[in-house]
Image: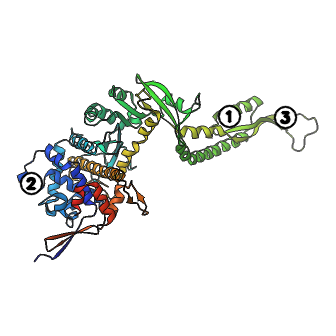
Amino acid sequence: MAEAYQSQTLDHLGLVASMFDELGLGEGLDEQIPQDREQRKVSVGQAVKALVLNGLGFVNQRLYLVPRFFENKPTERLMGPGVEPAHLNDDTLGRALDTLYAHDVTALYAVLSAQAAKRLGLEGRFGQLDSTSFHVDGDYNSAEEPQARVIHITRGYSRDHRPDLNQVVLNLMTEHQAGLPLFMQPLNGNSEDKAQFKQVVEAHLEQLCQASPLEYLVADSALYTQATLQSLGERKWITRVPATLKEAQRVLTSTPSEPMNVLDEDYRYQERVSTYADIEQRWLLVESTPARQRALKTVNRQVLKESGKEAQDFQRLCQQTFACSSDAQQALEQFQATLKFTTVEEGAVEALPAYDKPGRPATGQPPTTVRFRLRGALASAPQTREALLTRKSRFIVATNELDAHQLPPAELLTAYKQQSQVERGFRFMKDPLFLASSLFLKSPQRIMALMMVMTLSLLVYAALEYRMRQALTQHQQTFPDQKGQPTSKPTARWVFQCFVGIHVLIVQQSQTYVLNLHDHHRGLLAILGPPYETLYS
């Protein structure tokens, strides 16, 4: 006999499912991937949707636990008619990952992301490129020779400071309006940014620029190599100049010939033209007040430590004796040349007469021998501390866009600072409650496919946050923040938390009610549109 009442947990998953559908991700996958629908109860698009829902459920469950995740969820409401939790088993999801891998996850993702950006009306001028690492549980193919088209799971430079663990690397490019990831590429665990950025430029940038209206590629200093910049050709780019370059060191440490221009209360700048890799470019020397404040503690600690060492060295020097005055003077001059954090004040050479007989010498008695030693005091060198602070508060942003009207200094700096968008995406993907706090699957191929699913989850999250903020602003509506105050820019994570506790109640297998839906929920769903309202009705 069927139960009279059945309760299912909906929470924020209706928002996720609606955005997944709005972006056409499931449809796009099923169009790109030929599959025998007669042999599948769940299409590849639906299987990926299930993985995204699980990932954005923030429960950190392994792949084989996904069916358990859906046991108390309204699967037909979220996934489509006829889909039951039992259909979302590890075999179904594993085969879906195999299918994604077989169709080239990087190329497949590029098609979906371009479609998503178009549906959201994003016309980002800037694409931010960066990479990060994910540690992997298990050895996989780490002891084998690398294979074509399969990532090599091995040790490498760990962004998480775990060089003892095997890892994989992910290249990611986001656009600047919503932080939407436009490009993803799984890489070997020992991949190096400079080489991989060049490979992205040569193999993928042209296609990306055709699919999305990107005008500028933005990346960190790993992009600034002669080979990569020349590979970019006429493509516009923005990057940070490595401080290791001699010309950069000169610019960073020298005093500008003219006063620096004030950009805002936090930044000052000075423009100059430079040539590197036979490419004429604009350099924006930036001086950051926040960076100076961050450096204060470090610099003060460094100055104190090094000054103490120099004081000890001077004390030992003053305890030495020399055969002649010139030797003592030479030792003083050599010591002064080594000082960086202090200076010798009132340094002088004094004579130390010595007599053969003990006791007070007679008046006018010449000494048997004369030795010499140094005296003086060390004083701090404030100019050194100031130079250190200035150096740590400066950086150089470069671009091959020579027309300042097309890309004014303020916009150039803002574009570079928006690298935080992709870094925010990495933090999201590494959240302990996300799908991939650690990666453990049967094969490197499935890990590559799961990294695509992870990026799709980030895409859905970023798109949903952008749509909610856009809708609230356009309709002049607000949503209560953590303190109960109205805001038009809530984070998607906070909205998800606010939707926790929304359930679907089924009575006698015929009547359905959505419980615990309040005015702030209904208001947000109304401005997001009918598909969202329907899923919660």
| Residue at the (31%, 60%) spot, across then down | 523
Secondary-structure class at tag 2: loop
**Distance from label 3 to label 2 (Cα)?**
108 Å
- Of residue 374 and residue 166, the one placed in the foreground of this image is 166
Q: Answer whether residue 111 is visible to the viewer in this image.
A: yes
User: Is 216 in front, or is 153?
Assistant: 216
In the image, taking residue 125 as reference, residue 512 lies left or right, namely: left
Q: Name the residue: 34% across, 55% down.
A: 492
In the picture as drawn, the residue positioned furthest to the front comes out as 475
- For disc 2, the marked residue is 40
The residue that disc 1 covers is 336
Quadrant where the N terminus sits is bottom left
> Taking 494 as reference, is 183 left or right?
left
Report the Cα–Cα distance between label 1 and label 2: 81 Å
Q: Is residue 410 above or below residue 7?
A: above
* Mark 3 or 2, nearer chain start: 2
The amino acid beneath tag 1 is Gln
Q: As drawn, is 20 to the left or to the right of 246? A: left
Tell me the element at label 1: helix
Q: Which mark is residue 405?
A: none
What residue did someone put label 3 on?
Answer: 368
> Mark 1 or 2, which is nearer the eye?
2
**Which of marks 2 and 1 precedes in the sequence?**
2
Amino acid type, mark 2:
Arg
SS class, disc 3:
loop
Which of the image's four quarters has the C terminus?
Answer: bottom left
**Residue visible at 22% across and 60% down?**
535
